[in-house]
Amino acid sequence: QLQLVESGGDLVQPGGSLRLTCVFSGRSSDKLAIGWFRQAPGKEREGVSCVSNTGGSTRYADSVRGRFTASRDNAKNMLYLRMNGLKPEDTAVYYCAIADRLTPLLTTQTPYHTWGQGTQVTVSS
């Protein structure tokens, strides 16, 4: 059974940095694109970033491009999201999710079928 577990969320001051980690198990990851999503209180879940099956191609939401970097290590079955220059509007629960496709996709969440439980990121002074 495929499982995803996120970690690394924390309370951080504006301008600070965090690295989120997503560990997946139960299936080989080399045919799967993986995405990061977030949901703030009272808002819909939105795509943040996604990575192709090899890690060679990534997509970012306009709101995080240049500040966030997604990467993956298939040998370890892990996905990372490095977040720099954090802003209060980045406060949300962050989720990773799996899609049965090779290329990254952020325009729709429909292909993402397995989700982690989420990790809370709070940016506040």
Image (cartoon, rainbow, N blue to C red):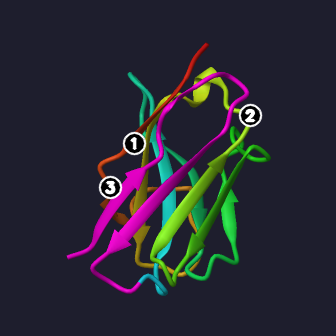
Q: Residue at x 32, y 83 (%)?
A: 27
Instruction: Give amino acid for label 3.
Output: Gly
Outermost residue, top side: 125
Instruction: Give amino acid for label 1.
Output: Thr
Reading the chain from its start, which is encountered first: label 2 or label 1?
2
> Which residue in the protein does label 1 denote?
119
> Which residue in the protein does label 3 denote?
116
Q: Quadrant of the C terminus?
A: top right
Q: Quadrant of the N terminus?
A: bottom left
Q: Are marks 2 and 3 in contact (CB under 8 Å)?
A: no
Reading the chain from its start, which is encountered first: label 2 or label 3?
2
Q: Nearer the viewer, mark 1 or mark 3?
A: 1
* Mark-to-mark CA distance, 2 and 1: 18 Å
Instruction: Give amino acid for label 2.
Output: Gly
Q: Residue at x 74, y 34 (%)?
A: 85
Name the spot of residue 116 as percent of width and height, x first: 32, 55
> Which residue in the protein does label 2 denote?
85
Image height of 95 relative to 12, above or below: below
Viewer-side residue, 38 vs 26: 26
* Mark-to-mark CA distance, 1 and 3: 9 Å
Per the rendering, the mark at residue 101 is none
Magenta includes 18? Answer: yes
Viewer-side residue, 89 vs 43: 89
Q: Residue at x 69, y 73 (%)?
A: 57
Q: Is residue 97 left or right of residue 73?
A: left
Residue neighbourhood size for the residue with mark 1, other residues' Cα within 10 Å, grouped as few (<14), some (14–19), many (≥20): many
Tag 2, which secondary structure? loop
Q: Are marks 1 and 3 in contact (CB under 8 Å)?
A: yes
Name the spot of residue 49 as percent of width and height, x first: 60, 55
| Span colored in magenta | 1-28
Magenta includes 72? Answer: no
Residue 67 is drawn in which quadrant?
A: top right
